Amino acid sequence: QVQLVESGGGLVQAGDSLRLSCVASGDTIGIAAMGWYRQAPGKEREWVGTAVNGGRTNYADSVRGRFTISRDNAKNTVYLQMNSLTPEDTAVYYCNAPYYTTEFWGRGTQVTVSS
């Protein structure tokens, strides 16, 4: 079992930056990658980006160039640095960790961007 806890959400203005963190605990050795998803009100949950073991990162087109994912393996933590935020980035952000044949999710952290 793996537990994921996100933090760092909040209310910011358009153009601001914010950094989210997700700390993994439990059987973290089985984690293949760590990533972020988001869900805006009334919309489906969408993939934001992933950092796989070994350092490679991938991003959704909507955030590429503005968001950066990094990992601190010693701390079992993944970060989501979000720059140039817009109101369209308003959502609950979830941490995700694929784990063998399943996956784990955090409970999410709210990010609200005002115009």
Image (tube, helix red, strand yellow):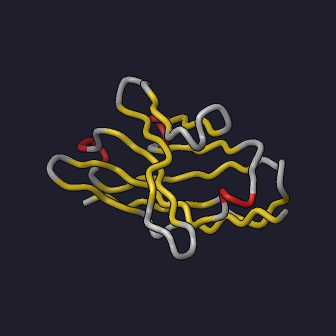
Residue 114, horizontal then vertical, whole percent? 81, 65
Split into 4 quadrants, where in the image is the N terminus?
bottom left
Residue at position x 49%, y 42% from top?
75
Residue 20 position within the rendered picture, expressed as x and y whole percent measured from the top left: 62, 52
Which image quadrant: the C terminus?
Answer: bottom right
Please count the marks in the image: 0
Q: Quadrant of residue 14?
A: bottom right
Residue shown at 44%/66% (left/top)?
A: 44
Q: Residue at x 37, y 23 (%)?
A: 54
In the image, residue 52 lies at what x, y percent?
37, 33
Question: Is residue 24 left or right of 80 when viewed as pictured?
Answer: left
Residue 74 in the image: x percent, y percent?
Answer: 46, 35
In-front residue for pair 4/14: 14
- As displayed, is residue 95 above or below residue 35? below
* Depicted 68 relative to depicted 47: above or below: above
Task: State the residue in front, 50 or 72.
Answer: 50
Q: Eyeballing the image, is 93 above or below 78?
A: below
Q: Residue furthest bottom?
A: 42
x 68%, y 45%: residue: 82
